[in-house]
Structures are given as C-alpha cells and as structure tokens.
Image (cartoon, grey):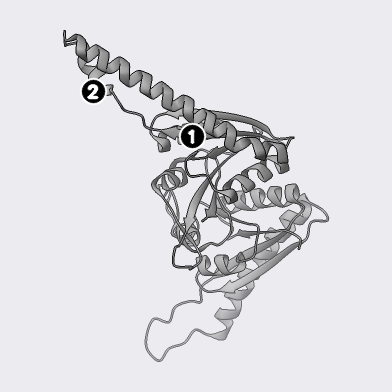
C-alpha cells in the first residue's frame, strides 16, 4: 500500500508549520497526505435549547474551507501529490488518532487554538501522543533552513527494531546524516574529586582516579556496543552517513542541546502493555517534547 502521512490542521501558526513538514515528509516518502480538521459543535447553554441548523451549517462550512485551504497549499507546493481532507465533528485528538491508525506518520503542531503563548505542548498533541499507534511528529523549535542532520536518541542496552528502522529509513529519505546519541549520567567519583582539593588524604586521590578509569571504560564499552549494534543497519542502508556519540551527562540535557543543530530528533516510547493503542512517554521523551529546538518524532516500540 502507498504510504500515508496524516496531519492535523486548524489554521493556527503551529499547524501551518505542521502542514509544511507533512508535505516534505510525504514528498520524501512518495506518500499521500490526509489533512484532518476537527471542530466542535457550539455547546447548548441551557436545557430545552438547541443550536440552530444555520449555525451548525456555518461551523461545518468553515471547517471544510479550512481543510480545503490546506489541501490547496500542498497541491500548489507539490503538484501531483495525492492530498485528501477529512473534516470531523468532535474531539481533535480522537479524530487524529483514529485517522492515523494505519498511517506511516502523524504530524502535529505543538499547540492548537486552545493553547496560550507560554504553553510548551498543547492538550491535543499530548492526548494524541498518548493514543497514537504510529510514529508521531510534534513540530516545534526554531524555524530554519534544513541542516541535513537527524539525531537518534538510542540506549545501547535497550535498542528497538522499530526505532532503528524508522531512523535509518528517515535518514535515507532525506539523504541526511544520522547522528546517534547515547547519553548516560556517570557520576561516580564526583564527590571524591570535589573533596580532593581540600583533603590531604592520598586515598581520596586514588579513589577519584579509579572512578575516572571506570567511567572511561564504560564509555569505551558503550561505543563498542553501539558499533556492533549499528553495523548491520549500516549494511542495509549504505547511503546513510552515520556518526555516533556517547556522552556523559543527563540524557535530557544532552539530547536537548543536540537538537540545536538538527532537523529532527527521533526517540522511542513503549506501547501500552495492556494491548491498548498509544504510548507511555518516559522522562527523556517528555523533556524533548517540551524543550527540543527542532521537530520531535516519537516512535512506538515494544
């Protein structure tokens, strides 16, 4: 089946950015695009009252016009691309997750109409992530020209086939460099090193040196593990320009800093264990969703 990219659109600036990203992704993948616009009926304010049919028709017409504008934008940018629209009355997150159930990618802005300026991640995006069953991109960060670099947040001790497949395929689609980052907080011996300047005890210095040696060995071991893990993937995707980085530091901070020089950061999230659709977002993923300086793709994994 031809791949499909689903994008949420509501005429807000974040959704305009999401629409452009969805078009790029579809062009790189040779995919079609489905533009989803959800709207709510005007609420009834008192018992035994109703919303006039003319008002309902106006709301529906406005929603259809918004979706048509988005379709026109993509058709103008990408002649020949198949672009469809879906207008749904009801909660936006539910409409988006249902429309993207069999999609290759869901693309959302970081905020919608209900958000305020200081809001880092809107309620629709948050709920959609919690129930999405396909890779989901949240478009955020500083708008800029493409840097041809993708960051993959990868734990060498807990890799996922789905995450690696998506990252290497994405780098191939974009002809971009794939920068694999493994960050871990190795704080061994820091207290001893801090005390070393005040202590005359030679044992403290030896303890700090031993901790440094252990830290260096762990970093070397992780680099070797990453090399062995990524080698088969590089064989399958020989055109991908791969680089790896093992950093000593808080994962959220290290990865957020890496997004300053990236077009995209990719991170995994475990699927719900009870078989229900959606993902459980860990602390590193949450940090990136709120602070990354580029779009974030969350890939569901086992």
Left or right placement of residue 202 versus residue 26 in this view: left
Residue 255 in the figure: left or right of residue 215: right
Residue 26's spot in the image, x, y percent? 72, 52
Give the side of residue 63 with respect to residue 76, left or right: left
> Visible in this render: residue 183?
yes
**Are the residues tagged 2 and 1 within 8 Å (C-beta)?**
no
Specify the farthest residue to the bottom: 48
- Callout 2: 10 Å neighbours few (<14), some, many (20+)? few
Q: Residue at x 73, y 35 (%)?
A: 238
Residue 43 occupies quadrant: bottom left
The residue that label 1 is drawn on is 182
Q: Is residue 94 above or below residue 291?
A: below
Residue 145 seen in the current view = no
Q: Nearer the viewer, residue 230 or 266?
A: 230
| Image spot of residue 243 (x, y percent) | 61, 29
Q: Residue at x 83, y 56 (%)?
A: 80
The quadrant where residue 171 appears = top right
The residue lying toward the viewer, choosing from 266 and 217, is 217
- Residue bearing mark 2: 191
Q: Is residue 44 above or below residue 165?
A: below
């Amino acid at each position: 089946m031809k791949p499909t990219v689903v994008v949420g659109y509501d005429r807000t600036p974040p959704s305009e950015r999401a629409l452009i990203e969805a078009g790029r992704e579809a062009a790189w993948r040779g995919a079609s695009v489905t533009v989803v616009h959800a709207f709510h009926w005007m609420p009834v304010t008192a018992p035994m009252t109703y919303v006039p049919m003319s008002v309902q028709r106006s709301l529906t017409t406005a929603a259809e016009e918004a979706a048509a504008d988005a379709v026109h934008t993509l058709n103008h940018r990408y002649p020949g691309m198949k672009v469809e629209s879906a207008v749904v009355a009801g909660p936006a997150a539910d409409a988006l997750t249902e429309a993207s159930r069999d999609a290759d990618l869901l693309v959302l802005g970081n905020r919608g109409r209900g958000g305020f300026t200081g809001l880092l991640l809107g309620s629709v995006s948050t709920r959609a992530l919690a129930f999405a069953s396909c890779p989901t991109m949240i478009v955020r960060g500083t708008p800029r020209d493409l840097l041809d670099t993708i960051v993959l947040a990868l734990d060498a001790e807990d890799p996922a086939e789905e995450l690696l497949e998506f990252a290497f395929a994405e780098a191939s689609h974009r002809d971009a460099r794939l920068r694999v980052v493994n960050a871990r907080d190795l704080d061994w011996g820091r207290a001893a090193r801090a005390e070393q300047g005040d202590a005359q005890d030679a044992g403290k210095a030896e303890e700090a040196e031993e901790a440094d040696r252990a830290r260096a060995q762990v970093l070397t071991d992780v680099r070797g593990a990453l090399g062995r893990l990524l080698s088969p993937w590089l064989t399958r995707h020989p055109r991908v320009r791969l680089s790896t980085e093992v950093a000593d530091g808080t994962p959220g901070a290290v990865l957020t800093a890496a997004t300053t020089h990236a077009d995209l950061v990719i991170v995994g999230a475990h699927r719900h264990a009870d078989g229900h659709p959606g993902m459980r977002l860990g602390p590193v993923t949450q940090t990136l969703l709120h602070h990354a300086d580029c779009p974030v793709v969350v890939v569901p994994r086992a």
